[in-house]
Image: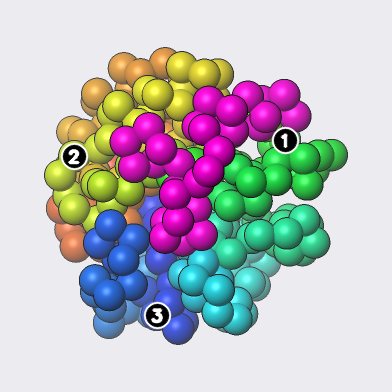
Amino acid sequence: MQLIPSLDLMQGRLVRLRHGDPRQATFYDLEPEAWIERLMEAGARRIHLVDLDGAFGKPRQGDFLSFPARFPEVRFQLGGGLRDRRTVESILALGFDAVVGTLAVENPTALAGLSKTHVIAALDLKGERIVTRGWQSPSAIASVDAFKALLSLGFRRALVTDVSRDGTLEGPGLAAAAFVAKEGFLVQASGGLKEISDLEPLKGIPGVVGTISGKALLEGFVSLEDPRTRTALEGTV
């Protein structure tokens, strides 16, 4: 089990959204680069970046595209607005793992032939229903059909967000993680982590290999000084 810090970026700034709603945004007076350096010192080996401008259909933020070259000790994964194959390929070429949501759900064959190691399907759930386009639209495709299509192409890595818990500190979405993992995916669970002990029930779900945390780390609910946090950050997916 690996704890994966998340940095949500909007207009070049660190931000957290409640339930993925841009109208419920909290901005942080902390430079993204400074936060990455603190996370690295605490043991982080993988960091999840979200380009919220891209997710909501605005021009992609460019400042963070150099992060894989600038911080080679960390493996970065990037999501938000990767809605065509060319964009996914360009992100992979920069050294990121690509977290692909809408395209992976609505047109998974567009990903055929891309790296099964470095492409991660973003499966965002409200209950057992997939939502896409920055969580703004319910998908017309049944969840099970989307899962089968991705698995048939060899894509087994998935980032699963329980949208109802994102940014709430109400505890992780165990049901959402288990729902996807039982289909055969290797799951990074996202949404609701409030304390380091929340990792324990996730460890008990077969197929869950990591968990994403943004707000809990940023606001100190999960302390970087806690040796359990270092152990989790240094874990391997």
Residue drawn at point x = 45 percent, y = 83 percent:
11
Q: Amino acid at mark 3?
A: Arg
Q: Inspect the image, locate mark 1, and give the three-letter code of the amino acid beneath it.
A: Lys
Residue found 66% across the figure and 59% down from its top:
83
Q: Nearer the viewer, residue 21 or 33?
A: 21
The answer to whether residue 150 is above or below residue 139 is: above
Secondary element type, mark 1:
loop
Query: Is 56 situated left or right of 97 in this image?
Result: left
Tag 2: amino acid: Gly
Seen as rendered, the residue at the extreme right is: 113
Instruction: Of the two numbered discs 3 and 2 on the same chain, state the one appearing first in sequence.
Output: 3
Residue at which label 2 appears: 171
Q: Is residue 225 visible?
A: no
The residue at which mark 1 appears reads as: 116
Q: Residue visible at 39% across and 53% down? A: 5
Tell which circle, 1 or 3, labels the residue nearer the N-terminal end.
Answer: 3
Q: Which residues are magenta?
A: 125-154
